[in-house]
Image (spheres, helix red, strand yellow):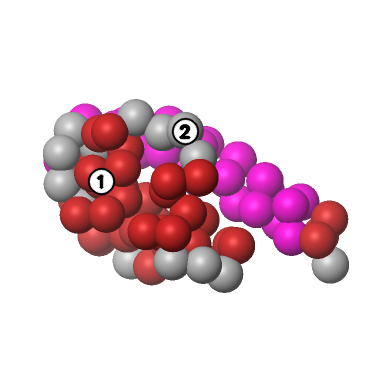
Amino acid sequence: MLDQFVGRPIREILPEINVQEGVKEALLTQSGPYGPLFDLAKVCEQGDPVQILAAAERCGVDQSILNTKLMAALNWANETAAITE
C-alpha cells in the first residue's frame, strides 16, 4: 500500500510520518487494535469476495459501508495516480 505507492519499505517510511502506535503495530506486524482492519484492507486489494466478507465480519464492518468506502478509496487512488503520471 503506502510502501508500494512511494517505492520504499514501510519500516523506512514510518519514522518519517506521524501515526499512532496501534497503526504502526498493524502495519509492521499485522497485529494490535488495527490488525483486523489492516487485514481487511489487504483482502480487499486481493479481490476475493468470500475473503472480503469474512474479514469484514471479523471487523464488524457492514458490507454496504465497505463497498462505499472501497469505491471511494479506488477513486482516490486513480485520481492520485493520474496526477503523478
- The stretch in magenta equals 58-81
Instruction: Tell me the element at label 2.
Output: loop
Q: Is residue 79 magenta?
A: yes
Of residues 7 and 76, the one nearer the viewer is 7
Instruction: Tell me the element at label 1.
Output: helix
The residue labelled by disc 1 is: 26
Of residues 75 and 33, the one nearer the viewer is 33
**Residue 37 drawn above or below residue 60:** below
Q: Position of residue 24 (x, y in %)?
A: 31, 42
User: Around disc 2, counting alpha carbons within 10 Å, would you say few (fewer than 14), some (14 to 19), or many (20 or more)?
Assistant: few
Q: Position of residue 65 (x, y in %)?
A: 43, 31
Using the numbered discs, state the Cα–Cα distance from disc 2 to disc 1 in whole angstroms: 14 Å
User: Around disc 1, counting alpha carbons within 10 Å, would you say few (fewer than 14), some (14 to 19), or many (20 or more)?
Assistant: some
Give the residue type that dot 2 points to. Asn
Q: Position of residue 68 (x, y in %)?
A: 52, 36
Residue in the image at 43% along x and 46% along y: 15
Q: Quadrant of residue 82?
A: bottom right
Of residues 40 and 2, the one nearer the viewer is 2
Q: Are marks 2 and 1 in contact (CB under 8 Å)?
A: no
Give the residue type that dot 1 points to. Ala
Q: Answer whether residue 33 is visible to the viewer in this image.
A: yes
Residue in the image at 60% along x and 62% along y: 6
Q: Answer whether residue 53 is visible to the viewer in this image.
A: no
7 horizontally vs 18: left or right: right
Q: Position of residue 56 (x, y in %)?
A: 26, 42
| Magenta-drawn stretch, dominant element (helix, strand or loop) | helix
Residue in the image at 23% along x and 44% along y: 25
Viewer-nearest of discs 2 and 1: 2
Q: In the rendered image, which quarter contains the C terminus?
A: bottom right
How many numbered callouts?
A: 2
The residue labelled by disc 2 is: 18
The answer to which of marks 2 and 1 sits earlier in the sequence is 2
